[in-house]
Image: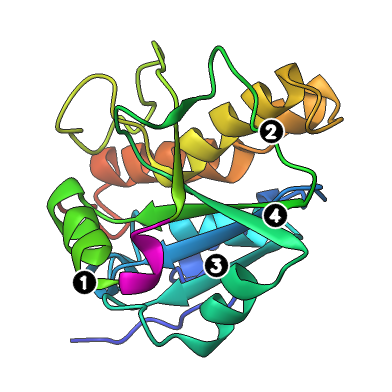
Amino acid sequence: MIQRDTCYSCYRPKTSCMCKHIKQINTKTKFIILMHPKEYKKTKNGTGHLTNKSLKNSELFIGIDFSNHEKLNKIINNPANETFIIYPGEESIKLNSEPIKSERNIVLILIDSTWPCSRKILRVSKNLKNLKKVSFISDKISSFKIKTQPNNYCLSTIESTQYILELLNKHKLENLESNTIKDFINPFNKMVEYQIECAYDEYKPRYKR
């Protein structure tokens, strides 16, 4: 089996590198992406890396139990920050209708994983248990045409982040141009286009579910 070269920026094979489509944006909000190791291995369709590379003010950490993660704990325990986790719950801040209220620097944690693996990360990571939750409801249907989502309302990490940016803008927590938010999803759209093209081109590596 021939090993293909990897781009160590977007972590995709160099033949399908999406870096040229990334337009980094700078946000007031700091984003932390907690990526499950299983997602890290999904070089063909993982969008966590694309999200991280598209946001200047972001960090990506890989693991399951983040209880003793030094860098994450430093961010959470920094008195200048107030850290929230994007996750549904009855007590969550419903971002569609209400803003995040904080006098400190807002940090949002996104879990890049399947729902079962996300629940495990929350269950075992003691430092995440007491964080306030933020949730949103989207009527958008994922553009991940090559991959079947568990439900119509499920979005990829980069699609979720784009919608969160729209809502943060709505509440004046960000001041981003509409075109900037629209272009944020470009590397994802190009990735999906490439995967569909591969599915129909016998001379290109095939996408496999």
Marked residue nearer the N-terminal end (4 or 1):
4
Identify the mark at residue 55; answer none if there is no mark: 4
Distance between the alpha carbons at the discs numbered 4 and 2: 22 Å
Residue at the location (12% across, 52% down)?
116
Q: Nearer the viewer, residue 195 or 63?
A: 63
Q: Specify the quadrant that holds the N terminus.
A: bottom left
Marked residue nearer the N-terminal end (3 or 2):
3
Residue 84 is one of the magenta-drawn residues: no
Distance between the alpha carbons at the discs numbered 1 and 2: 28 Å
Highlighted range, magenta: 126-130
Q: Which of marks 3 and 1 is in front?
A: 1
Q: Quadrant of residue 75?
A: bottom right
Q: Is the magenta stretch mostly helix, strand or loop?
A: helix
Query: Mark 4: which secondary structure?
Result: loop
Q: In this view, does 95 lie to the left or right of 148?
A: right
Q: Name the residue under label 3.
A: 10
Q: In this view, does 149 lie to the left or right of 82?
A: left
Marked residue nearer the N-terminal end (3 or 4):
3
Distance between the alpha carbons at the discs numbered 3 and 2: 33 Å
Q: Nearer the viewer, mark 4 or mark 2?
A: 2
Q: Mark 2 points at which residue?
A: 101
Residue at the location (48% across, 35% down)?
159
x and y percentages locating residue 114 in the rendered image: 21, 51
Query: Mark 1: which secondary structure?
Result: helix
